[in-house]
Amino acid sequence: MAKESGQKDVLSLKSVIGFSGNVASGLHYTPCGRFVAFPLGSVVVLKALSSKKHFFLDAGIDKKVSCVAISKDGSYIATGHETPAAFKSEVVVWNLKKAIECISNDVLRSEDCIVHILTQHHKQVQALDFSVDGQYLTSLGGQDDNDLVVWDIGKGIAICGSPAANDLTRCVKWLNQRNDRFVTCGNCHLRVWQICFRTQKLHPVDVCMGSMRRIMQCLCISADDSFAFTGNKTGEVIKFNIERDDIKNFNEQEVHRPSLNCYNKERFSKGVRAVACVVNPTTGNTNVIAGSGDGTVHILNPKLQPIPTHAAKLHGAVTSIALHPDGKSFMAGTGLSQRYSVDVSTFTPELRETCHFGEIHDVKFPQKSSEIFVTASEQDIRVWSAVYNTELLRINVPNLTCYAIDITPSGGSIVSAWSDGKIRSFFPESGKLQFMIPDAHNDAVSSLAINNRDGGNESLWHLVSGGKDGRVRVWKINAKHQTMVH
């Protein structure tokens, strides 16, 4: 219904349970440290850590968020999206300070926080990063684009652009003390770029890597801009000297050229997916936090040797490491959509948020309660508290997908439909298997509904199931056996 002011009534967002953990470096703290931003499908969620309030940054774009960046001064947040190959992908720049004010004032409209919607890349925006002063934004296209574009945030226009490299480029990071240089890395290359604002051109210098060939998939730069650290698919963290000369004529001799410094000898399993620089407050040295594909998080010293006392194991591949502005802790996101808080001194992980990592196929509330609900997704069923937004129970069935769930009127059984053609029932308190109907359908069981036709008789009830084979079947369920009626 429309109001007298012409605006439409909007449902108030109470809470959010979700996190797109597969987005590389998608988890971020705001510079003030009081909020955390993370992607969720086609939107970005801004969460207040103290009040637990959520705010959707939704530009009305129904395409998945592929990357997120926050300016170092806390003025802007940028999101990149992915589209079908025939269309251009959007880069949305938001006013972060205004979004934080909206959270404080319980304002729901995020459209008022949009600063620019920029379009240049095809299919996907691979990575984004702001300059140190927040005046410029660099966007990197995906595999089908692979172009670099530098944007003027104040004017919302492109200053210059260039192909990123001959091979796929995966990451881009601005230097911390200069607003005219940034670094990119990808398949078998790392380049240090400098912008000539007078001619509006980009000038890259390739790092001399010798005979080393690595696919680099994450990047961070030390606070003094002396070194860049990359993580690669073979499980190594590589340290590069990134000092280079200013822009010269082609016939002038180079004095400083970026080069490979060192790399760790003990490789991480399943590759290094996320890296972050952290300064040791005692020695002042720059250490590196590295997250691997097997869920291991390590701190490496300046010589890239792992510190044995600073290691932790998380659930899922580590895809994001967001260092808190005070440098005493960091937040890690995994590919299984888990978010952990880790204290740097003790290195003890604490699970902060958890959710499904795949598509949610069904949601059910019990008939006699609105305080809990059950969800069905890939490989598991979860029971949630609607009051505290926390997970109460997880029922794992590996390598299978649950398409539908229902709860008996008494609440004594959670009945579920699975991709292997079986119907499984679980106890809601313990999650243990109550009974299973094998070969309920030739293909996956896609839907089901409970019908208690016998009134108060809780031990005898009927179940209707539908399968992807197009058949509907009726089952008679009692305490000891299950029989197909139709």
Image (tube, helix red, strand yellow):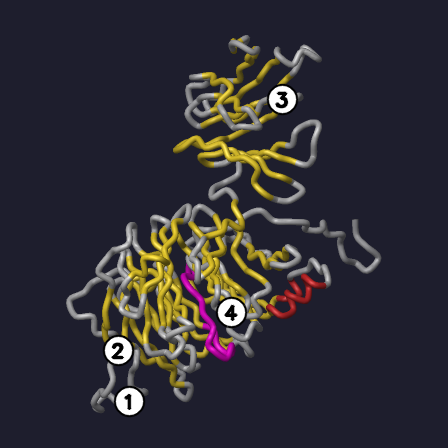
Nearer mark to the viewer, of 1 and 2: 2
Give the CA separation, mark 3 to mark 2.
66 Å
Residue 408 disc label: 3
Tell me which numbered mark, 3 or 2, is placed earlier along the sequence: 2
- Name which residue type carries label 2: Pro
Task: Please rate how many residues cluster around mark 1, counting C-alpha atoms within 10 Å: few if below 14, some from 14 to 19, many from 20.
Answer: few
Give the CA separation, mark 1 to mark 2.
15 Å
Return the residue at label 4. Answer: 326
Camera-nearest residue between 458 and 249: 458
- Name which residue type carries label 4: Asp
Tell me which numbered mark, 1 or 3, is placed earlier along the sequence: 1
411 lies above or below 297: above
**Quadrant of the rendered image containing residue 169:** bottom left
Return the residue at label 1. Answer: 248
Q: Is mark 1 on a helix, strand or loop?
A: loop
Judged left or right of residue 351, residue 192 is left
Q: Is mark 4 on a helix, strand or loop?
A: loop
* Magenta range: 122-137
Return the residue at label 2. Answer: 258
